[in-house]
Amino acid sequence: MLTVVVVSVIKALIVIGMVLNLAGILGWVERKGSALIQDRIGANRAAIFGFAGAGLVNTLLADPIKFLTKEDVIPRGVDRLLHTLAPCVALFPAIVAFAAVPFGDRLRIGDMVVNLQAVEIDVGVLFLLAMTSLGVYGVVLGGWASNNRLSLLGGIRGSAQMISYELAMGLAVVAVVLTYGSLDFQEIVRRQGHMIGGWIPAWGILYQPLAFLLLLIAGIAETKRAPFDLPEGESEIVSGYFTEYSGIKYLMFFMTDFVEIAVVSAVVTTFFFGGWQVPFLASEGFVFPWGWSVPLPHVVVVLLQVAAYMVKVFIFCCLQVLVRWTMPRLRYDQLMWFGWKVMLPLGLANLVVTALVLLWIQG
Amino acid sequence: MPNNDRLLSIIRGRCAEAVIRTDDYRGDATVVIRPERLLEIARVLRDDRELAFDLLLDVTCVDYLGQQPRFELVYHFYSTRHRHRLRLKARVPESDPTIDSLVPLWVGANWLERETYDMYGICFRGHPDLRRIYLYEEFEGHPLRKDYPKEKRQPLIGPGSKGTYKPRPPEIPHAHRVEGMLGAELMRVQLGPSHPATHGTVRIVLDLDGETIVNADVEIGYLHRGFEKECESGFYYQAIPYTDRLNYSSAILCNVGYCMAVEKLFGVEVPLRGQFVRVIGGEISRIADHLLCIGATALELNAFTPFLYALEARELAWDLINALCGARVTSNFVRIGGVSADLPEGFAELCQQNFKRILELVADAEGMLLENPVFRARMEGVSIMSPERLIAYGVTGPLLRAAGVDLDLRRAEPYLIYDQLDFDVPLGSQGDNLDRFLVRLTELRQSIRIVEQCLRLIPPGPVDVDDPALRLPPKGRVFNRMEDMINQFKLVTEGPKPPPGEVYFAIESANGELGYYLVSDGTGKPYKCRARTPSFSNTQPLAEMVRGRLLADIVPTFDMINMIGGECDR
């Protein structure tokens, strides 16, 4: 019993550490990445002994310290409880959503089998949808509690947007669930392990390309980043729902964005890009279709899988950073039009076609 | 000009008994009328087919302290059809400084008359909303009157204030009292005065029904610093640095306009090379201005990357200005009767090199924006206003050309050497924000073309007029010859003295018609120095353009109007 608890705590710590550090790293990637795109140098003040690459480590430390030591301004007329609660309500579900996403296959240590997933729930997909839905409360509360009309507008925009795009996201997820016949992330990843014709990895993107696009777009909309950053649309409503926040609370909203990016990337990776699967890597080592094989010890195989998972997630994070720095912002009516009249019908059509094809194959 | 005679005789014929006298000084047709007949004459000016003065450019006043009647109201008109100008003047007494408002005829007279009321205390009969525009309601007196001391301070709050000021909730005069959707109350929101989208301090008070704008009121004046009062208290040449600060993103154009107005007052013309140098400096300024406008629009639609490309290109344009005059922003480049310096050595090569990179950057930014469906959707069909309405508001420049009106003063009344140059005037068709954007983008490339032509065609010779009454003699002569020493002394301490008279001169600045109206009483200081700035007139229709649209549409519209605070608030 004790070992189970210890293992669970270790896994939880690993996931939290992974998520929070990824968020920090993304903050740096965003600065340096945008600088690269925009022909600038970017953040270069945090170098250690003149080595700019060390800026990453430094930024990870310096950013939280800076925000922690800043004054926490609470304007007059603010609902203090809700004002404080909002950033926590925003950040918490985003981090927790990660718990259900597997970051590796089973790890065998002696007799013990550890499933590399913070929480083993067989309805992980539902859990994830539930948690991402909760994210909207942080936005609404932040906008409402701030006693600022521009914040309120941001909160309203945010809730309308997140609810609208959740539908398309849900439909895309349902199509995926139908395809794999499971609500368990680990199961979905395992189903993507074989090779089509021995050559092509059977990743979800091949079965559900449209669902991939829908999920990615809806996911970006859920993260409230360009081109869907209306809730904070800084040229219209200053900073939207977090206009009145400062210090560590501001950082929490800021981190929520980055954690959500990571969640979207993790979900996309898990559903459509084989999660922790490495092409041609079986449990005994690499087996190539042209007959070669490289036997590897079990630990190395698991480590490779974890690494592959992280690389994939990171690539999708970078993709989202790239999108954010190239796209202008949509207008409210355009956003709603796109959500309800493009994404939703496409999601429905995708679901119906998936269901019909499944019926045809099985029946 | 010969057609001025015809023009004046037509006006005399149409309303003989209302006209007191007409004159034609340095090509400016002027009609002095009886104040009580203003509305009637103005209607004739606007509606008569042969006159067709559809553009009310400027309303201002001159305070002739000690004369009776004391105040002279001055109106400047332009006809986009016949391309002629007219100045209309009417005197009102100090005891009853009242005249009819022109708002029923030109909606754009609204702000202009409010400004005149604010600065001179002239009351306009029938004006729908006669409030102060630059100064605050608690301000006592009218600062441009000659008996208002320049040094007088009236702080609203803080030391020296009366301490009676109480903040008021934001108001929208004449707001439509309508209910929102499902009978909801409207939400009153303020954008500005300090707001990320209002570069240049301006406040927009809005009534929102959800995201839709029901009422809007634009409040300017936060950057008012008494341009006219300052200019009137210094010599003619001392006003040049102030003109830099009108439109600080294209300072040389403001310099050129002012100096040419003063030269018109003197009746001198700059040598050919000087004219070329002015065109080169002015067009590089225009490039910088358009680059900023394009970049800022992209930025505020959250396309950060094209913004930085545009700013890098503007840096290169500023490098050229820096090479010309040693300053980047406030150039103070042009002088009365010439320019501060001839082109530096190797300037043509530097231009060639920088223009190449600017064009590359602009092409990149253009590709990122115009090929992006989101950007197009945000700009296309937004804030369309008919050309007639724009003209009624007194809008000029790229905004008006985007609506398809072919009015570019470089073409319509070529000044400097523009008639010798080959360039296109881009016109839009629909007049939406995308057209405005495209017009600026094309103009920018045309300006590069103009500068390249100038650098090819520029003749050798002096850049300054050879007139000791205007330009300082070279230092070598000052130190060696008595006459030149005296001349230098007199120029610096008394300033050049133009003959008495008044002129209006306008150039095509980056945002539209930038005109200066100067009144000389024969001394070294201008009796009246008025800048008719395009931003002021162009900002006025903003409220109407965004009414009924979504909150987010304010952003691109405001950007394409390109309000420059310094120019708008003077």
Image (cartoon, grey):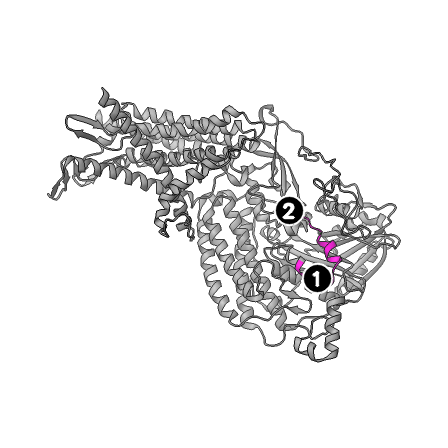
Q: Main secondary structure of the magenta part?
A: helix
Q: Nearer the viewer, residue B115 or B140?
A: B140
In the rendered structure, which amino acid carries the disc numbered 2? Thr
Query: Which residue does the numbered mark 2 point to in the structure image?
Result: B539
Q: Which residue is the site of mark 1?
A: B238
- First of labels 1, 2 by sequence position: 1
* Quarter that holds the N terminus of chain B: bottom right
Examine the structure image and report whether residue A243 is included in the region drawn in magenta.
no
Region in magenta: B223-241
Badge number at residue A238: none
Chain identifier of the residue bearing label 1 in the image = B
Q: Nearer the viewer, residue B54 or B449?
A: B449
Residue A182, percent from left and from top: 26, 25
Q: Residue at x 71, y 74 (%)?
A: B467
What is the x, y in percent for residue B320?
A: 53, 64
Vertical placement of A213 versus B566: above or below?
A: above
Image point 61% across, 66% down: which residue? B278
Task: Classify residue A247 as left or right of residue B244.
Answer: left
At horizontal 79% and vertical 55% (from top left) the residue drawn is: B88
Horizontal placement of A38 versus B244: left or right? left
Q: Residue furthest bottom?
A: B480
Residue A348 visible in the picture: no
Which chain does the residue under circle 2 lie in?
Answer: B
Above or below for A360 versus B65? above
The answer to which image quadrant residue B511 occupies is: bottom right
Q: Residues within 10 Å of mark 2 (few under 14, many from 20)?
A: many
Front position among marks 1 and 2: 1
Q: How much space separates mark 1 and mark 2, taking CA atoms?
A: 29 Å
SS label for mark 2? helix
Image coordinates of residue B276 in percent, x first then y, are 60, 69
Q: Position of residue B366 (x, y in %)?
A: 47, 52
Residue type at tag 1:
Gln
